[in-house]
Protein backbone atom coordinates (compact mmCIF):
# COMPACT_ATOMS: atom_id res chain seq x y z
CA UNK A 1 0.00 0.00 0.00
CA UNK A 2 1.40 3.35 -1.06
CA UNK A 3 1.50 5.88 1.81
CA UNK A 4 -0.08 9.32 1.32
CA UNK A 5 2.38 12.21 1.36
CA UNK A 6 2.31 14.44 4.48
CA UNK A 7 0.11 17.40 3.51
CA UNK A 8 0.66 19.36 6.75
CA UNK A 9 3.76 21.32 5.59
CA UNK A 10 1.96 22.29 2.40
CA UNK A 11 -1.07 23.53 4.34
CA UNK A 12 1.15 25.52 6.69
CA UNK A 13 2.92 27.10 3.73
CA UNK A 14 -0.40 28.10 2.15
CA UNK A 15 -1.59 29.60 5.45
CA UNK A 16 1.67 31.53 5.78
CA UNK A 17 1.38 32.89 2.24
CA UNK A 18 -2.24 33.94 2.85
CA UNK A 19 -1.22 35.64 6.10
CA UNK A 20 1.61 37.53 4.39
CA UNK A 21 -0.64 38.62 1.53
CA UNK A 22 -3.31 39.70 4.02
CA UNK A 23 -0.84 41.74 6.09
CA UNK A 24 0.61 43.35 2.96
CA UNK A 25 -2.88 44.22 1.71
CA UNK A 26 -3.82 45.70 5.08
CA UNK A 27 -0.54 47.62 5.18
CA UNK A 28 -1.08 49.08 1.72
CA UNK A 29 -4.67 49.96 2.58
CA UNK A 30 -3.48 51.68 5.74
CA UNK A 31 -0.72 53.53 3.88
CA UNK A 32 -3.25 54.88 1.36
CA UNK A 33 -5.51 55.89 4.23
CA UNK A 34 -2.50 57.69 5.73
CA UNK A 35 -2.05 59.57 2.46
CA UNK A 36 -5.63 60.83 2.67
CA UNK A 37 -5.15 61.84 6.32
CA UNK A 38 -2.01 63.79 5.42
CA UNK A 39 -3.89 65.70 2.73
CA UNK A 40 -6.61 66.50 5.28
CA UNK A 41 -4.10 67.70 7.89
CA UNK A 42 -2.33 70.03 5.44
CA UNK A 43 -5.55 71.96 4.99
CA UNK A 44 -6.24 74.77 2.51
CA UNK A 45 -2.84 76.44 2.94
CA UNK A 46 -0.76 73.35 2.23
CA UNK A 47 0.34 72.14 -1.16
CA UNK A 48 2.61 69.34 -2.40
CA UNK A 49 3.99 68.40 -5.77
CA UNK A 50 3.59 64.68 -5.19
CA UNK A 51 2.68 62.16 -2.48
CA UNK A 52 4.10 58.71 -3.11
CA UNK A 53 2.87 55.55 -1.41
CA UNK A 54 5.72 53.10 -0.79
CA UNK A 55 6.27 49.78 0.93
CA UNK A 56 7.41 51.36 4.19
CA UNK A 57 5.48 54.61 4.32
CA UNK A 58 4.54 57.80 2.53
CA UNK A 59 6.96 60.13 0.75
CA UNK A 60 6.02 63.79 0.28
CA UNK A 61 7.88 65.83 -2.31
CA UNK A 62 8.09 69.64 -2.37
CA UNK A 63 5.78 70.46 0.50
CA UNK A 64 4.76 74.08 1.05
CA UNK A 65 2.55 75.69 3.67
CA UNK A 66 1.86 79.23 2.55
CA UNK A 67 1.46 82.10 4.98
CA UNK A 68 -1.99 83.66 5.23
CA UNK A 69 -2.04 87.16 3.80
CA UNK A 70 -4.10 88.66 6.64
CA UNK A 71 -1.92 87.48 9.55
CA UNK A 72 1.07 89.80 9.07
CA UNK A 73 3.42 86.83 8.71
CA UNK A 74 6.91 88.15 7.85
CA UNK A 75 7.71 85.62 5.09
CA UNK A 76 5.89 84.09 2.14
CA UNK A 77 5.83 80.61 3.66
CA UNK A 78 5.48 79.04 7.08
CA UNK A 79 7.16 75.83 5.96
CA UNK A 80 8.85 74.29 2.95
CA UNK A 81 10.46 70.90 2.56
CA UNK A 82 12.03 69.15 -0.41
CA UNK A 83 11.36 65.63 0.88
CA UNK A 84 9.52 64.16 3.85
CA UNK A 85 9.44 60.44 4.59
CA UNK A 86 6.69 59.36 7.00
CA UNK A 87 6.88 55.92 8.60
CA UNK A 88 3.61 54.98 10.31
CA UNK A 89 3.06 52.69 13.26
CA UNK A 90 1.68 49.43 11.88
CA UNK A 91 -0.34 48.58 14.99
CA UNK A 92 -2.26 51.87 14.92
CA UNK A 93 -2.42 52.33 11.17
CA UNK A 94 -6.07 51.38 10.82
CA UNK A 95 -7.31 53.12 13.98
CA UNK A 96 -8.94 56.54 14.29
CA UNK A 97 -5.69 58.00 15.63
CA UNK A 98 -2.89 58.56 13.16
CA UNK A 99 0.23 57.18 14.85
CA UNK A 100 3.63 57.84 13.29
CA UNK A 101 6.92 56.27 14.34
CA UNK A 102 9.17 58.73 12.53
CA UNK A 103 9.13 61.71 10.20
CA UNK A 104 12.39 62.42 8.37
CA UNK A 105 12.62 65.87 6.75
CA UNK A 106 15.20 66.96 4.17
CA UNK A 107 15.75 70.45 2.72
CA UNK A 108 13.42 72.12 5.21
CA UNK A 109 12.71 75.83 5.65
CA UNK A 110 10.81 76.93 8.77
CA UNK A 111 9.76 80.47 9.66
CA UNK A 112 9.18 81.44 13.29
CA UNK A 113 7.70 84.69 14.61
CA UNK A 114 8.02 86.19 18.06
CA UNK A 115 5.10 88.60 18.28
CA UNK A 116 5.12 92.01 19.98
CA UNK A 117 3.69 90.44 23.14
CA UNK A 118 6.52 87.89 23.23
CA UNK A 119 4.40 84.95 22.06
CA UNK A 120 6.24 82.52 19.80
CA UNK A 121 4.33 81.40 16.70
CA UNK A 122 5.30 78.35 14.65
CA UNK A 123 3.16 76.92 11.81
CA UNK A 124 -0.03 78.79 12.78
CA UNK A 125 -1.69 77.73 9.53
CA UNK A 126 -1.28 74.10 10.59
CA UNK A 127 -1.40 74.10 14.39
CA UNK A 128 -3.84 76.96 15.03
CA UNK A 129 -6.44 76.09 12.37
CA UNK A 130 -9.41 74.03 13.47
CA UNK A 131 -11.36 71.88 11.01
CA UNK A 132 -14.61 73.35 9.71
CA UNK A 133 -16.55 70.27 10.82
CA UNK A 134 -17.42 70.44 14.52
CA UNK A 135 -20.14 67.78 14.85
CA UNK A 136 -19.62 65.32 17.67
CA UNK A 137 -19.08 61.59 17.34
CA UNK A 138 -20.57 59.02 19.71
CA UNK A 139 -17.54 59.24 22.02
CA UNK A 140 -17.78 63.03 22.25
CA UNK A 141 -14.80 63.95 20.07
CA UNK A 142 -14.99 66.32 17.14
CA UNK A 143 -15.96 64.58 13.93
CA UNK A 144 -13.58 65.36 11.10
CA UNK A 145 -10.70 66.24 13.45
CA UNK A 146 -7.65 64.07 12.85
CA UNK A 147 -5.56 63.23 15.91
CA UNK A 148 -1.88 62.64 15.20
CA UNK A 149 0.72 61.15 17.51
CA UNK A 150 4.32 61.52 16.36
CA UNK A 151 7.12 59.71 18.19
CA UNK A 152 10.03 61.42 16.45
CA UNK A 153 10.68 64.17 13.91
CA UNK A 154 14.20 64.41 12.47
CA UNK A 155 15.34 67.40 10.40
CA UNK A 156 18.56 67.23 8.40
CA UNK A 157 20.22 70.24 6.79
CA UNK A 158 17.36 72.62 7.49
CA UNK A 159 17.02 76.40 7.60
CA UNK A 160 15.18 78.43 10.24
CA UNK A 161 14.40 82.13 9.88
CA UNK A 162 13.49 83.66 13.24
CA UNK A 163 11.65 86.99 13.13
CA UNK A 164 11.46 88.93 16.40
CA UNK A 165 8.85 91.70 16.48
CA UNK A 166 9.26 92.24 20.23
CA UNK A 167 12.49 94.20 19.71
CA UNK A 168 11.61 96.75 17.03
CA UNK A 169 8.68 97.71 14.83
CA UNK A 170 10.42 96.06 11.88
CA UNK A 171 11.12 92.49 13.09
CA UNK A 172 14.73 91.55 13.75
CA UNK A 173 15.69 88.60 11.56
CA UNK A 174 18.07 85.80 12.56
CA UNK A 175 18.92 83.02 10.12
CA UNK A 176 19.99 79.54 11.19
CA UNK A 177 21.43 77.13 8.66
CA UNK A 178 22.73 73.54 8.60
CA UNK A 179 20.10 72.66 11.18
CA UNK A 180 20.08 69.11 12.50
CA UNK A 181 17.16 68.75 14.88
CA UNK A 182 15.16 66.10 16.68
CA UNK A 183 11.69 66.49 18.19
CA UNK A 184 9.93 63.72 20.06
CA UNK A 185 6.48 62.81 21.35
CA UNK A 186 4.23 65.35 19.66
CA UNK A 187 0.44 65.08 19.81
CA UNK A 188 -1.54 67.16 17.30
CA UNK A 189 -3.80 69.10 17.75
CA UNK A 190 -3.86 68.65 21.56
CA UNK A 191 -0.14 69.45 22.03
CA UNK A 192 -0.22 67.85 25.48
CA UNK A 193 2.69 66.01 27.10
CA UNK A 194 6.42 66.69 27.11
CA UNK A 195 8.10 67.22 23.74
CA UNK A 196 11.85 66.68 23.68
CA UNK A 197 13.80 69.10 21.47
CA UNK A 198 17.42 68.97 20.38
CA UNK A 199 18.87 71.42 17.85
CA UNK A 200 22.35 71.99 16.44
CA UNK A 201 23.07 74.54 13.75
CA UNK A 202 24.90 77.57 12.43
CA UNK A 203 23.84 81.13 13.22
CA UNK A 204 24.62 83.28 10.19
CA UNK A 205 26.53 86.50 10.78
CA UNK A 206 27.68 89.48 8.74
CA UNK A 207 31.38 88.76 9.27
CA UNK A 208 31.44 85.21 10.63
CA UNK A 209 29.10 82.36 11.51
CA UNK A 210 28.59 81.00 15.01
CA UNK A 211 27.33 77.74 16.47
CA UNK A 212 24.05 77.12 18.28
CA UNK A 213 23.04 74.14 20.42
CA UNK A 214 19.71 73.68 22.24
CA UNK A 215 18.74 70.64 24.30
CA UNK A 216 15.69 70.16 26.52
CA UNK A 217 11.94 69.61 26.58
CA UNK A 218 8.72 71.65 26.64
CA UNK A 219 5.05 71.06 27.44
CA UNK A 220 3.48 73.13 24.67
CA UNK A 221 0.14 73.72 26.37
CA UNK A 222 1.37 74.83 29.81
CA UNK A 223 4.68 76.21 28.40
CA UNK A 224 6.59 74.47 31.21
CA UNK A 225 10.08 73.78 29.90
CA UNK A 226 13.71 73.16 30.66
CA UNK A 227 16.44 74.01 28.15
CA UNK A 228 20.20 74.31 27.92
CA UNK A 229 21.26 76.81 25.26
CA UNK A 230 24.83 77.33 24.05
CA UNK A 231 26.18 79.90 21.58
CA UNK A 232 29.79 79.93 20.44
CA UNK A 233 31.62 82.47 18.29
CA UNK A 234 28.47 84.32 17.23
CA UNK A 235 28.84 87.58 15.27
CA UNK A 236 27.88 90.38 17.67
CA UNK A 237 26.54 92.58 14.90
CA UNK A 238 23.51 90.33 14.34
CA UNK A 239 22.69 90.09 18.06
CA UNK A 240 23.25 93.71 19.04
CA UNK A 241 19.49 94.54 19.00
CA UNK A 242 19.21 92.30 22.09
CA UNK A 243 22.13 93.93 23.91
CA UNK A 244 22.20 97.47 22.59
CA UNK A 245 19.31 99.92 22.87
CA UNK A 246 18.39 102.04 19.84
CA UNK A 247 20.04 105.17 21.28
CA UNK A 248 23.26 103.37 22.24
CA UNK A 249 26.56 102.98 20.44
CA UNK A 250 26.55 100.32 17.74
CA UNK A 251 28.91 97.37 17.30
CA UNK A 252 31.38 97.17 14.42
CA UNK A 253 32.97 93.87 15.33
CA UNK A 254 32.98 91.25 18.08
CA UNK A 255 31.96 87.72 19.00
CA UNK A 256 29.63 86.38 21.65
CA UNK A 257 29.58 83.18 23.69
CA UNK A 258 26.57 82.28 25.81
CA UNK A 259 25.71 79.52 28.27
CA UNK A 260 22.10 79.61 29.48
CA UNK A 261 20.12 77.09 31.50
CA UNK A 262 16.48 78.11 31.53
CA UNK A 263 13.40 76.61 33.14
CA UNK A 264 9.74 77.63 33.16
CA UNK A 265 7.37 76.18 35.75
CA UNK A 266 3.80 77.42 36.21
CA UNK A 267 4.64 80.55 34.26
CA UNK A 268 7.73 81.40 36.32
CA UNK A 269 11.02 81.78 34.47
CA UNK A 270 14.42 81.13 36.03
CA UNK A 271 17.47 81.30 33.75
CA UNK A 272 21.02 81.62 35.08
CA UNK A 273 23.58 82.29 32.39
CA UNK A 274 27.03 83.49 31.44
CA UNK A 275 27.81 85.88 28.59
CA UNK A 276 31.27 86.53 27.16
CA UNK A 277 32.07 89.22 24.59
CA UNK A 278 35.41 89.05 22.76
CA UNK A 279 37.33 91.39 20.42
CA UNK A 280 34.63 94.03 20.73
CA UNK A 281 34.92 97.10 18.50
CA UNK A 282 32.34 99.84 19.00
CA UNK A 283 31.28 102.60 16.68
CA UNK A 284 33.15 105.87 17.17
CA UNK A 285 31.74 108.83 19.06
CA UNK A 286 30.01 109.20 22.41
CA UNK A 287 27.05 107.24 23.69
CA UNK A 288 26.69 104.06 25.73
CA UNK A 289 26.93 100.29 25.33
CA UNK A 290 24.87 97.88 27.45
CA UNK A 291 24.11 100.73 29.83
CA UNK A 292 27.75 101.74 30.12
CA UNK A 293 29.37 104.84 28.64
CA UNK A 294 31.27 103.88 25.52
CA UNK A 295 34.66 104.82 27.00
CA UNK A 296 33.95 102.72 30.09
CA UNK A 297 33.10 99.69 27.95
CA UNK A 298 36.26 100.14 25.87
CA UNK A 299 38.36 100.50 29.02
CA UNK A 300 36.80 97.43 30.60
CA UNK A 301 37.63 95.43 27.49
CA UNK A 302 41.27 96.57 27.51
CA UNK A 303 41.66 95.75 31.19
CA UNK A 304 40.41 92.17 30.66
CA UNK A 305 42.55 91.01 27.70
CA UNK A 306 39.92 91.85 25.11
CA UNK A 307 37.03 90.10 26.87
CA UNK A 308 33.99 91.08 28.90
CA UNK A 309 32.49 88.15 30.81
CA UNK A 310 29.46 88.41 33.10
CA UNK A 311 27.15 86.04 34.92
CA UNK A 312 23.48 86.94 35.19
CA UNK A 313 20.10 85.62 36.29
CA UNK A 314 16.81 86.17 34.49
CA UNK A 315 13.63 85.70 36.53
CA UNK A 316 10.01 86.66 36.06
CA UNK A 317 6.42 85.77 35.30
CA UNK A 318 6.15 85.15 31.56
CA UNK A 319 2.35 85.55 31.75
CA UNK A 320 2.66 89.07 33.16
CA UNK A 321 2.13 91.56 30.28
CA UNK A 322 4.57 93.92 32.01
CA UNK A 323 7.35 91.35 31.88
CA UNK A 324 9.89 92.04 29.11
CA UNK A 325 12.69 89.54 28.67
CA UNK A 326 14.61 91.97 26.45
CA UNK A 327 14.56 94.78 29.00
CA UNK A 328 15.41 92.45 31.86
CA UNK A 329 18.37 91.01 29.95
CA UNK A 330 19.83 94.47 29.30
CA UNK A 331 19.32 95.51 32.93
CA UNK A 332 20.72 92.27 34.38
CA UNK A 333 23.83 92.45 32.21
CA UNK A 334 24.55 96.03 33.17
CA UNK A 335 23.92 95.18 36.83
CA UNK A 336 26.25 92.17 36.65
CA UNK A 337 28.97 94.25 35.03
CA UNK A 338 28.81 96.75 37.87
CA UNK A 339 28.67 94.07 40.56
CA UNK A 340 31.73 92.31 39.14
CA UNK A 341 33.64 95.57 39.67
CA UNK A 342 32.43 96.01 43.24
CA UNK A 343 29.94 98.82 42.59
CA UNK A 344 26.93 98.90 44.93
CA UNK A 345 23.76 98.54 42.88
CA UNK A 346 21.60 99.15 45.96
CA UNK A 347 22.95 102.66 46.44
CA UNK A 348 22.40 103.46 42.80
CA UNK A 349 18.88 102.03 42.87
CA UNK A 350 17.88 104.17 45.85
CA UNK A 351 18.78 107.30 43.99
CA UNK A 352 17.00 106.23 40.83
CA UNK A 353 13.92 104.63 42.37
CA UNK A 354 14.84 101.23 40.92
CA UNK A 355 17.10 99.70 38.33
CA UNK A 356 16.02 101.69 35.30
CA UNK A 357 17.49 104.17 32.86
CA UNK A 358 18.78 106.54 35.58
CA UNK A 359 20.29 103.67 37.52
CA UNK A 360 22.07 102.35 34.44
CA UNK A 361 23.45 105.83 33.81
CA UNK A 362 24.71 105.86 37.39
CA UNK A 363 26.38 102.50 36.91
CA UNK A 364 28.08 103.81 33.78
CA UNK A 365 29.31 106.99 35.49
CA UNK A 366 30.77 104.95 38.34
CA UNK A 367 32.52 102.62 35.92
CA UNK A 368 34.06 105.56 34.09
CA UNK A 369 35.53 106.85 37.34
CA UNK A 370 36.73 103.37 38.35
CA UNK A 371 38.50 102.89 35.03
CA UNK A 372 39.99 106.36 35.07
CA UNK A 373 38.14 107.60 31.98
Image (cartoon, rainbow, N blue to C red):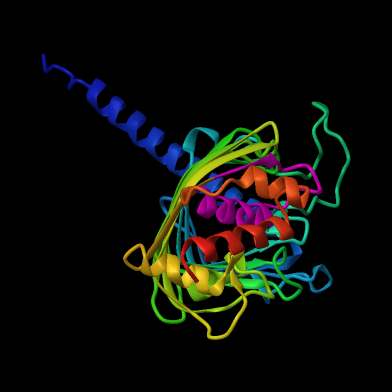
Q: Position of residue 15 (x, y in %)?
A: 36, 29
Q: Which residue occupies the foreground of this view, 232 or 125?
A: 232
Question: Which residue is pictured at 53% across the width and 83% down the height?
Answer: 283
Work out which quarter of the rendered image holds the N terminus and state it.
top left
The answer to whether 147 is drawn above or below residue 4 in the figure is: below
Q: Which residue occupies the foreground of this view, 253 or 1?
A: 253
Q: Which residue occupies the foreground of this view, 4 or 86?
A: 86
Residue 216 appears anywhere in the view: yes
- The question of residue 38 being in magenta is answered with no
Residue 98 appears anywhere in the view: no
- The question of residue 329 being in magenta is answered with yes
Question: Which residue is pictured at 44% across the width and 38% down the height?
Answer: 23
The answer to whether 218 is drawn above or below residue 236 in the figure is: above
Q: Which residues are magenta?
A: 313-339
| Residue 213 horizontal side relative to residue 316, left or right | left
Question: Which residue is pictured at 78% across the width and 48% down the height?
Answer: 353
Q: Which residue occupies the foreground of this view, 206 or 297?
A: 297
| Residue 208 horizontal side relative to residue 324, left or right | left
**Residue that sits furthest to the right in the current view:** 135
Question: Which residue is pictured at 78% across the width and 56% down the height?
Answer: 117
Amino acid sequence: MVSQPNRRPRILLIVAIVAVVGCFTAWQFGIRALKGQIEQVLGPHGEVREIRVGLTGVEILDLRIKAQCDTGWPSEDELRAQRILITPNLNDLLTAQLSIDRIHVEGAYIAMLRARNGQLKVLPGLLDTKPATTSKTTNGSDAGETSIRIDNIAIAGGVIEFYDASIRRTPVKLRLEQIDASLGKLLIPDLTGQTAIKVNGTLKGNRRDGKLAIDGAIELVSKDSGFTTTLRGVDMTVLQPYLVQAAETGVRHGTLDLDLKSSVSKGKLRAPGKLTLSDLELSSGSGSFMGLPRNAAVGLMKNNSGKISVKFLLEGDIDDPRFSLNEQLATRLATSLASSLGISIESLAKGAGGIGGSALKGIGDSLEKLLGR
